Image: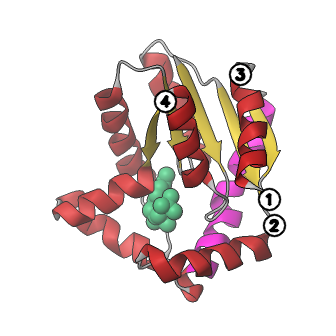
Amino acid sequence: MKNIVLFGAPGSGKGTQSELLIEKYGFKHISTGDALRAEIKQGTELGKIAQGFINDGKLLPDDLIIKLLASVYDSMLPCEGIIFDGFPRTIPQAEALNEMLKERGETLSAMIELDVPEEELITRLILRGKSSGRADDNEATIRQRLEVYKQQTRPVSDWYEKEGSRHAIKGIGSLESIFADICKVVDAL
Ligand code: AMP
């Protein structure tokens, strides 16, 4: 079974590329952002906590998100592979992911990073906000999310580089060419 982290800033194309990977390889997909938005919709306790963090463009506490991730992961087994989208976003989350996989006799297959310049991210997220209906796709929250990304999430990229599992992909250009580059990494796993 393949366990693949699709990594990148908000707006880097993780969701779109995940959909293409699901279609081509039959993988399952865990988006912690989608899982939290579902909790909010259902009005659960976690949803109530999540709402404030999401609207402020801040990260949820690691322990809550790690617990959520493990329960969604277990609900998806058995399967050919799982793509992690929007997780891990902090080094403790990356460490917890390794630990969670180890406890289940699994390992991380690869971390694939979509590299997109910041101006392009802002343009894409503002455009997405016109149709996504997401409360956090407005300019002030977008800037806050990108700041959080720089401070808390970007160091995770170096962490994976040191682990030897990071594969960087240029995340600009056509969807198809970006997807082809991702497939080259996946096919070699
Ligand atoms: P996303 O849909 O991945 O952009 O996530 C939307 C929001 O959900 C983020 O801005 C955070 O508030 C929250 N969130 C999603 N994933 C995580 C995570 N791994 N750790 C902490 N907060 C998260």
Left or right? Give the position of 105 relative to 36.
right
x then y, percent, for residue 122: 69, 77
Residue visible at 51% across and 79% down in the picture: 129
Q: Secondary structure at mark 3?
A: helix
x then y, percent, for residue 183: 71, 32
| Residue at the spot of label 3 | 187
Amino acid, disc 4:
Phe
Q: Tell me the quarter of the picture where residue 78 sits.
A: top left
CA gap, disc 2 and disc 3: 26 Å
| Residue at the spot of label 2 | 117
First along the sequence among labels 3 and 1: 1
The label shown at residue 27 is 4
Left or right? Give the position of 154 relative to 140.
right
| Residue at the spot of label 1 | 172
Question: Can you tell me whether the CB of the residue at mark 4 lies under 8 Å from the nearest atom of ligand 1?
Answer: no
Given contact means CB atoms under 8 Å apart, are the residues at marks 1 and 2 in contact? yes
Look at the image and say whether residue 150 sits in the magenta stretch.
yes
Residue visible at 41% across and 43% down in the picture: 66
CA gap, disc 3 and disc 1: 21 Å
CA gap, disc 1 and disc 2: 8 Å
